[in-house]
Amino acid sequence: MTNINTALATSIFAKPTSAMRMHQLLVAGAVAVALAICSINAMAKPVSGEESPDFTLKSRDGGNIKLSEQRGNIVLVNFWASWCGPCREELPAFEALYQEYQDLGVEILAINVDDEAEKANVLLQDIEVSFPVLFDTSGEVSQLYDVSAMPTTVIVDRDGNVRVLHPGYRKGDEKKYEKAIKLLMRE
């Protein structure tokens, strides 16, 4: 019995064979790949049906607005910049949607991504909007949403889930937004 115990102890505490070491390296590599994929997925832009990433930003009025405080409303989150030509076209279209649907539980949060709020304010002297304008001068929220095109619009349902993610703007896109709003109002 002593020889069996000695043999067992020797095999447990012995240096790993090259095959055992190779197995350990493969397992460690697989774990590293899995962690990397999880990190990438955590940074990926929101997908339709997933919960919208929450944020708090300073508004043009001076207060802070937090997306999660809008639960119960349908929210159009629009990322825009003062230098963006299509954004200049889209803002008046959003104002028309806001005037039509604000009393029915629709909110528009226009997030300006310029590095200085003053750039947005200069543009807003020419284009009047009554919905909240927020400032993402650090770019943190636009990174959170992986914004890669100006403008980008995200429609969030009453439960806080992303339902539409639309990069860019072409004349007539506001009709698609209106259709989405009407569908969400029926839910």
Image (spheres, grey):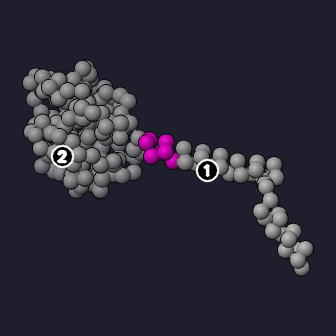
- Kindly check if marks 2 and 1 are in contact, taking CB atoms under 8 A apart as contact: no
Is residue 65 placed above or below 140 in the rendered structure?
below
- What's the residue type where badge 1 is placed? Val
Q: Residue at x 9, y 39 (%)?
A: 61
Q: Which residue is mark 2?
A: 65
Is residue 114 placed above or below 55 in the rendered structure?
above
Residue 137 in the magenta stretch? The answer is no
Measure the alpha-carbon separation of dots 2 and 1: 40 Å
Depth order, front residue of 20/164: 20
Q: Residue at x 12, y 44 (%)?
A: 63
- What's the residue type where badge 2 is placed? Ile
Tell me where the magenta segment starts and ends, as one range.
37-44
Q: Position of residue 152 (x, y in %)?
A: 32, 33
Label 1 Cα neighbours within 10 Å, binned few <14 / some 14-19 / many ≥20 = few
Quarter of the picture containing the C terminus is bottom left
Query: Which element type, helix, strand or loop, lies under badge 2?
Result: strand
Label 2 Cα neighbours within 10 Å, binned few <14 / some 14-19 / many ≥20 = some
Q: Position of residue 89 (x, y in %)?
A: 22, 24
- On the rendered structure, is 54 left or right of 44? left
Any part of residue 173 in sight: no
Q: Position of residue 51 (x, y in %)?
A: 36, 52
Q: Which residue is mark 1?
A: 31
Residue 38 in the magenta stretch? The answer is yes
- On the rendered structure, is 76 left or right of 51? left
Depth order, front residue of 32/171: 32
Q: What main secondary structure does the magenta stretch of the protein show?
A: helix
Q: Quadrant of residue 159?
A: bottom left
Quarter of the picture containing the N terminus is bottom right
Query: Which element type, helix, strand or loop, lies under badge 1?
Result: helix
